[in-house]
Every structure is written in structure tokens, then in C-alpha cells.
Amino acid sequence: MFSWGGVSFCLSGAALYWLSRNTGHDAALLQSVRKVNQLKELASLLDSARKAFPVIVTVAGRVGSDAPITCDHSSLRAVILEEIAEQHFLKQNETGSWIQDSALMLSISKEVPWYLEDGSGRVFVVGARGASGLELTVASEVFEESGRSLVRGTLDYLQGLKMLGVKRVQNVLPTGTALTVVGEAVQDDQGTVRIQRPHRGAFYVSPKSIEQLVAHLGKWSRWYKFMSIGFTVFGVYLVASHAIRHLLENRRRAALHRRVIEAAARRREQRNLEGDDDENGRSESEAAMMKLDTLPNICVICLEQDYNIVFVPCGHMCCCSSCSSQLSNCPLCRRRIEQFVKTYRH
């Protein structure tokens, strides 16, 4: 038998170790990435490294765009906009009480071509929404109350609903935001330089500097490693303790079985000596039954009475009613006894 809890902890530890390795690998990769101090250096770097593609670099600058998005409920101008609209309402549950709930009505995501600039040049960023570390700012959060139409309100009430209103939230990446981008630098035929996701390697768009990113990933790598060790040790402990309990239970069961068989043999010898059950007068069927009776129905405590009590929740039946009244744990599996169920034979 297996300890599924212990196995689960061991598998969780393996998953955390895998996360630790990946996070540590990303941190080491970011440390080895070439840092471009000025964006104007990218073009000359790509010209000199045309035979050594891909070129993975880290650049920093401020967000800009030739056609930014204007937010509806704020004065912000952004290059990425994500808007969600949720319908909030009260609904009646089975007990007749009203509880608050919400449902997604609308989800919009927009992005315009944008770039990083630092005064010396600019570089376009492609596919930023799929990058790690991207953080969007909450531009606006508006709650619009539902209209008070009598007909609509009556229909909603009959369906067990009370409409409260619509909540609209806009998350944006504003222009002028300072960002650090780690990715593959490429240059097209028109001379435009872009940063995009590399075929292999890390792709980050983050407000943190490259040093902060490396420190952040290193910290999480160590945390994942410590948690992996803890989960694995605890899982091994659960598996080992379950195996030891199972082994001890089997040994106790075997010892009790031997005691019962020895007691049954002594009882048969005593009956033979007293003449209660003369072997010469037995029928052939009774003799065969006695030979097949490897584990008599004898209480494992007193070894005299037949067992007739089932222990709950373990389900073992090995004691008589007199001995069971003095027990708190099952003599076979050592589990605590919560209930005694008496059985009867016809």
C-alpha cells in the first residue's frame, strides 16, 4: 500500500525543484546578456554581428508611440490597453438569501506599434503582451449603475436577480513609462531595429532594471529550492512512516494469528483429553473441517471467547465483547476505535 499524501508531496517537491532550476537558469541567462547602454549602439552592434545571430540584448528607455491610444475615462495616453466590463448583481440562492455575484460582459485588448527611446535613438518592441514581467497600470475604474426600468427590474426579480450595475476597468501601459526589455534584436531591410521574443531564451518587459530582475529571479530560485527540499523531506517522511506502520501491523497480525492458532490447538487437545470430542467418534466431515480451520474465530485478547465485535472505522473483527469494552485502539492496526458494532451468527 502507498501513502498517496507522501507521494503527492514528493511530486510537488520535484515540480518546485524544476521551477528552481528554470528560474535560476533565467537569472544566469540575464546576467550573461549583453547590456546596451545607448539605443543608437544597437544598429552598429547588429551590423558587426550579422554572422552571429541571434543577438540577445537588454535595453532600457521610455515608452513612446506615433499613434498612442487615448483612454476614455482618463487623460492617459497608452500603447497597450486592456478593458474589462463586469455585470454586478444580486442573486437569490436556495435558502432565499440574496448574495452578490458578477459576470464578465466584455474583454477588449488593444496594442499599437510602440518603441523605447532614450534620447539617442529608438527601438521597437514586438509581442510585449506575451513577455514576462509586464505590469499594466490601472487607468480608470468606473461603476455604472443599472437603469431603473420597471419592466426590466420585474423580469430580473422573477428570475431571482437584482441588477446593480456595470464595473469597467482599464489597464494600460502609458507612454513615458521607463522599461527594461530583454530579447532578440533584429533589423529589417529599412533599417528599423526591433526587440522580439527569441526562439530560445528569456523575453522580459519589466519596469525593473536588469540588476533588479536578476536579484528577483535569484531570490525566487532559492525559495523554490528550499520549498522543494521541505516538500520532499516531508513526503519521504510520510512514505517511510506509512511503510513502517504497515510492516508493524503485519507483524502484529502474524503474531496474533499464531497465538490464536496455538490457543485453538490447546482447546482441541483439552477437549480430546476430557472426552468431549473423541477423535474416533468424529465424522469424516468434521475432521476435514478441523484440518481446514487455520484461523479459528477466537478473541485475540483472551483466547477463550469467540470474537463478535467489529471496530469502526478500521473494520477489523478480532475481539469478544468483554475484551473490546477495555480497548481504545484496535490490536491489529492500532487505529483509534470510534464505535463498537456487535455481530451475531445464526
Image: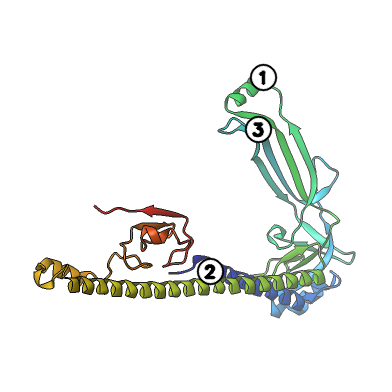
Do tag 1 and tag 3 residues touch (Cβ < 8 Å)?
Answer: no
Kind of element beneath mark 2? helix
Check disc 1: other Cα within 10 Å, few if <14, some if 14-19, many if 20+: few
Who's the residue at 46% across and 69% down the image?
A: 2
Q: Is residue 166 left or right of 121 when viewed as pictured? A: left
Of marks 1 and 3, which one's residue comes earlier in the chain? 3
Q: 258 or 216: nearer the eye?
A: 258
Which residue type carries mark 1? Leu
Q: How is the image coloured?
A: rainbow
Whether label 2 touches label 3, CB < 8 Å? no
> If you read the primary sequence from the N terminus, does the residue marked by circle 2 or circle 3 appear first?
2
Residue 329: percent from left, percent from top: 47, 63
Which of the two discs, 1 and 3, sits closer to the camera?
Answer: 3
Residue, disc 3? 90
Is residue 3 visible from the viewing direction of this image? yes
The residue beneath circle 2 is: 6
Decide if residue 132 is on the left or right side of residue 174.
Answer: left
Question: CA–CA distance between discs 1 and 2?
Answer: 59 Å
Q: Which residue is mark 1?
A: 150
285 up-or-down from 83: above or below: below
Q: Considering only vertical position in the picture, is 117 above or below 167?
A: below
Say what amino acid the circle numbered 2 marks.
Answer: Gly
